[in-house]
Image (cartoon, grey):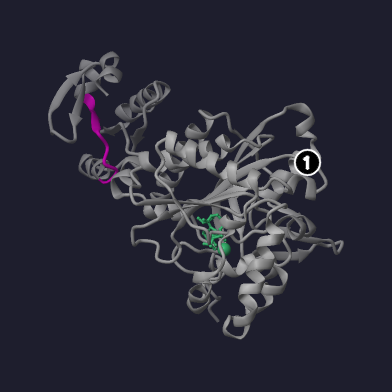
Amino acid sequence: MAQKQLRSVRGMNDLLPPYSDTWVYFEAQCRQQFAGYGYREVRTPVVEDTALFARGIGDDTDIVSKEMYTFADRKGRSLTMRPEMTASCVRAYIQHAIGKQEPVTRWYYIGPMFRYERMQTGRYRQFYQVGIEAFGIAEPSIDAEQIAMIYELYKNLGLTELDVVINSVGGPDDRPAYRDALRAFLLPMRDELCSDCQRRIDINPLRVLDCKVPSCKQKVADAPSILDHLGEASRSHFEGVQRYLTELGVPFRIDAKLVRGLDYYTGTVFEIIATGDTLGTQSTLVAGGRYDTLVENLGGPATPAVGFALGIERAILSLPEATAAAAATVPDAFIATRGDAAHTYAMGLAQRLRRAGKYIELDHRNGSMKSQFKRADKLSARYVIVIGDDELASGKLTLRNMDSRDESQVDEAALVAAL
Ligand code: ATP
Ligand code: MG
């Protein structure tokens, strides 16, 4: 009997060339952009104690209540494949007492996250995030700087249809009063809300504002605004964020219903949304905010913090074709050879050119000149260097520009310059 074909797990995709070229390019652009603002890379384990996420993200969030990959290891300990990385960063920050070593810490990360979700375009079970976290800064200028940093990068990558949305969900001092006001507004319409929202009214009514069910969305349209319930400190912080965003040239709008799906946010929250039509309802590209109480809640010293995470799949799905094409890697030259002596010489030549930083292709399979040119075309090589007996004897190599079809005779010393 034929064996069943093995396949990757549903919702978990292989990342293969040429698609991976764009991916690597995007990551490199992020690294370069973040470096200019003082962010340095951290890599934490994929697997953590389940308690970290339950305590960090919040028991009643969608992520913790229904999306986590949790399993018992061989000793029966409950472990979870990280659904996001802020909790891991905070754990590492506390564990290594980073706050004792430096007053301000800026980190970024790139890696896979795992959530058991219903799959759609832009929504997967293993997906990749790039994220940043800044610890130790309470001032609103860092919130604005982070938003501007990623907004500029996306704009430079050719993403023009972007909507920057900000809100303040208030701090521990403002939230209880707002929670009560919102609960009072929601209770009379309880029966008309979805079952999740009915539960949320009691546990965390702010989350009702985040519900994706259309009838719930409609019901909360007239809900009281958190912005009317901000105390003086939260209000002036939020005004500061807006002032700096304006200074940095970031167009934004305020949405008082933006609350985000994680419990740890305090004060500023923001999203960058793609307004084009490639992503459908999965249009949030970047999401983040302040989490001034999380370090303390997870057992560390009180430390203000702010950060964001972006989904790489969604970023790449919304990149214009020109940007994706620019990311493609094409050979600087393809060396086509005739005969053993030429092939032997070509091996050394390729190595010398690669030492000079060039991407050189060379066909090892001993095919015809015609098939080698075909291969060079297929790879979109910029030049073909032809080497046969004549070239070996004269020391002059034939260099063909594959765009213009011009040919010239050059010696090896002139090659690097010509390429
Ligand atoms: P959504 O509302 O789309 O479910 P979220 O609020 O769960 O997003 P965050 O946890 O804040 O998202 O993650 C930040 C970013 O990571 C998202 O804006 C998105 O770009 C990306 N992301 C989140 N979940 C997924 C997923 N399952 N597949 C692909 N990308 C994702
Ligand atoms: Mg989600």
Residue 146 percent across, percent down from the top left: 53, 39
Tell which residue pokes out farthest to the top in this image. 413
Label 1 sits on residue:
302
Q: Is residue 9 visible?
A: no
Q: Is residue 386 left or right of residue 173?
A: left
Which residue is located at x 48 percent, y 32 percent? 32
Q: Is residue 168 above or below residue 407?
A: below
Residue 42 percent across, percent down from the top left: 65, 38
Whether 384 is among the magenta residues is: yes
344 or 13, nearer to the observer: 13
Which residue is located at x 69 percent, y 61 percent? 177
Quarter holding ligand 2: bottom right
Q: Which residues are magenta?
A: 378-389
Residue 166 percent across, percent down from the top left: 50, 51
Q: Is residue 279 left or right of residue 110?
A: left
Q: Is residue 253 above or below residue 76?
A: above
Q: Is residue 193 above or below residue 296?
A: below
